[in-house]
Amino acid sequence: MNLPNYFLADLPPEATLSPAMISEACQTLKRNREQYLANRSTQSLVNFLSELAENWLEPEFLFRKFALENAKAIGFSRATLERGLNSFFKQLTRENFNALLIQEFGDAKRLDQICATTIEEKFSRAAIARAPEFQVHICAGNIPNPTLTSIIFGLLLRSAQFAKCASGSSFLPRLFAHSIYDADAKLGACLEIAEWRGGNHDLENVLFAEADCVTATGNDETLDKIRKHLPLKTKFLGYGHRLSFGFVSAEVLYGSRGKKIVAAAVDDIVAWNQLGCLSPHVIYVELGGEIAPEHFSQLLAEELEKREANEPRGEISTEESAAIAHRRGIYEVRAAHSPELTQHFCSKDSTAWTVIFEADARFQTSCLNRFIYVKPVANLKTALENADAVRGKVSTVGIAAPEEKISEIPLQLARWGATRICPLGQMQNPPLSWRHDGRSALGDFITWTGLELNRE
């Protein structure tokens, strides 16, 4: 499949971008938005995006096939990429888009016209929501979902967009942008995709000067640097480094149910090779169940071995493999000397997966790429005490618990500071209306205009 040169990211690797090229691209995007996007209805965009998502779920869709054929270039095995694409695009339905709009604005037409909810009508008030005309996205390169979501939300908000991808990570965003262009060239003309190494101030200063809003995903240091280079007038939405973990209650650790929970945990570990902020680093297993934490670790290892056969991790960098091998070596020594405190399970002749059982319940960051810790705890309170070092940095907690605890456990986690709680097995599959880092999905972009009506 030969992609036409619609976007800056389509240029050959030897091409050099200049500030003048970036400035011209921004001006073109703004003109195209005014002509092709500004007056599109929200519902027409919902229909377009949901139909495009349906196409991406079709096995014979050319852009999907091309993505899967080039999975290695995207950084994943074909099976892992296929699972990730399916999970992502299944969320993009008309029903989910409309639920998102109502959640964020109270009315799905709020971006089109001045309107009122039932409560607002009671107080003779109405309002319209206005989004930035031109958004710039500074995208991380670990997994594609955040970049695709930014593009989708930008279209929904009728913003022209410039997505600057991390070096070596533009393939799938570029392919998605081409699928938009192929389905509706006018909408595609309101989007630009480019790639360069971060910190190129000559290019970025021009880009930032044009933007009404800049979004950025990355570590806290990167976000701080971007913030310092933005004009005061520019809205900035940064999404920093986050961690996640799982918790399994003792009451569900028995028989076939326990094995289903193990399989669900593996779903979270293998999804996008554990590289996203929503992937678990640690699974806390409550003591007292029929399946002890040590046995849970063994079952987890067995399931990861099975999964590697039909959904392999794929290749990783030499540096990543070395980091896993080094960490494994530490725990291999500990396990040899104190097997009651540490146990070590790993794939043979590769770094494909690793399970570390450790009696020390303190939260430990993983090497990722399917490297998981299992730690025993007396209860959830003990787990949270041991995770206190990352309190305020935790995105998602995946839980497996009996129905009678389903209200108690989330409340405890919410008061501790977790911003998303979901069933184990769904950690890397948030709903479209997910409030990222506990913030409004669309509301952070919005400026409101309120209307106070005649009360007589």
Image (cartoon, rainbow, N blue to C red):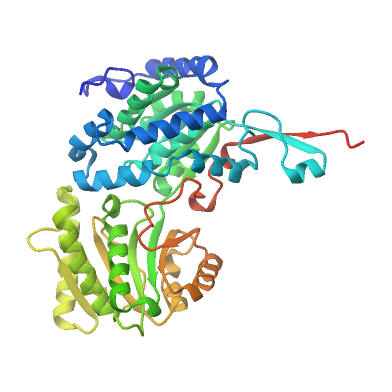
- Name above or below for residue 178 compared with residue 293: above
Residue 161 pos. (x, y %): 46, 27
Q: Which of the pair 164/431 is nearer the observer?
A: 431
Residue 13 appearing in the image: yes
In the picture, the quarter occupied by the C terminus is top right
Q: Which of the pair 23/273 is nearer the observer?
A: 273
- Name above or below for residue 31 compared with residue 61: above
Residue at figure coordinates x 18%, y 68% from the top left: 302
Query: What is the total number of numbered labels drawn onto the structure image?
Result: 0
Residue at figure coordinates x 45%, y 15% from the top left: 28
Residue at figure coordinates x 34%, y 69% from the top left: 283
Residue 296 pos. (x, y %): 26, 75
Residue 60 pos. (x, y %): 24, 32
Residue 70 appearing in the image: no
Q: Residue furthest left?
A: 349
In the picture, the quarter occupied by the N terminus is top left
Whether residue 125 sits left or right of residue 241 in the image: it is right
